Amino acid sequence: MDFFDFHHHKKNVAYGIYNAEPNVTPPDIPYSIGIHPKDIDINLIDNQLDWLLSNINENCLAIGECGLDSLVSIDQKIQEEVFLKQIKIANELKKPLIIHCVRKFYEVISFKKYAEQPMIIHGFNKKQNIAEDLLKKNFYLSFGKPVLYNLSLQHILKIKPLDKIFLETDNEDFNLEELYKKTSELKGISLEKLNEQIIENLETIKNG
């Protein structure tokens, strides 16, 4: 059985969404493309947006990673401006958004009103109250390796709606099947049913 990797950084994985590297032409596999907060160059923002737009083709499944990060040196206001520009690109191209967020969840939630397409928080590993607030605003959550050992995340995943989740490796080196098996165990469903639901969720976000 193949397992869909919602967000990864491996050019040799075709069954998933590869995160395109900045200023590089994406490989010929399904990918997302965006300007990560840490990669924003305040002197070259227009060039970076041109790169993003000129590298969108039929393999592009989403815009991102994009979002807000309190730990990077880029000014918050500039981060927000670049984030909003990418939301508008996603609206125009009818692509879902893969969101990177570090300690700025309520600011990201405030941007939801501008988005006409689904927004997915990738690598979610925060507390239950944040998960609940995100789900109330119709965000999807994508979970990664920490679910294998973090009991709090396991609880969140166990009680959250199956039609609002994805699973990913991100840049971690582990077998994605382990994460699918743990999730099927937590949700009390078969691996086959989980796999079917993830693909159904993917079709839902692709269709807006």
Image: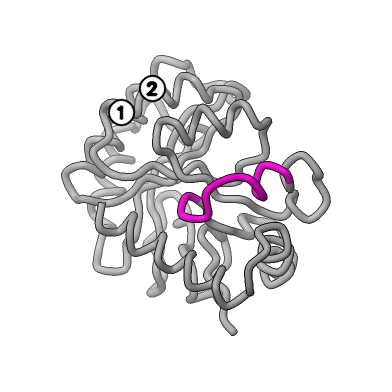
Q: Residue most toward the left? A: 92
Highlighted magenta segment, given as a residue range? 155-164
Count numbered badges in the picture: 2
Q: Secondary structure at mark 1?
A: helix
Task: Tell me the residue at 47%/50% (across/down).
Answer: 164
Q: Which residue is mark 1?
A: 84
Q: Are marks 1 and 2 in contact (CB under 8 Å)?
A: yes
Instruction: Name which residue lies at 30% across and 59% down.
Output: 206
| Residue at the image point whose x is 68% and y is 63% from the top | 188
Q: Is residue 170 left or right of residue 111?
A: right
Q: Main secondary structure of the magenta part?
A: helix
User: Could you say which is closer to the camera, residue 147 or residue 9?
Assistant: 147
The x, y position of residue 149, in whole percent, is: 83, 51
Q: Amino acid at mark 2?
A: Glu
User: What residue would you read off at disc 2?
Assistant: 80
Place of residue 25 in the rendered image (x, y in percent of width and height, measured from the top left): 37, 62
Displayed quadrant of residue 193: bottom right
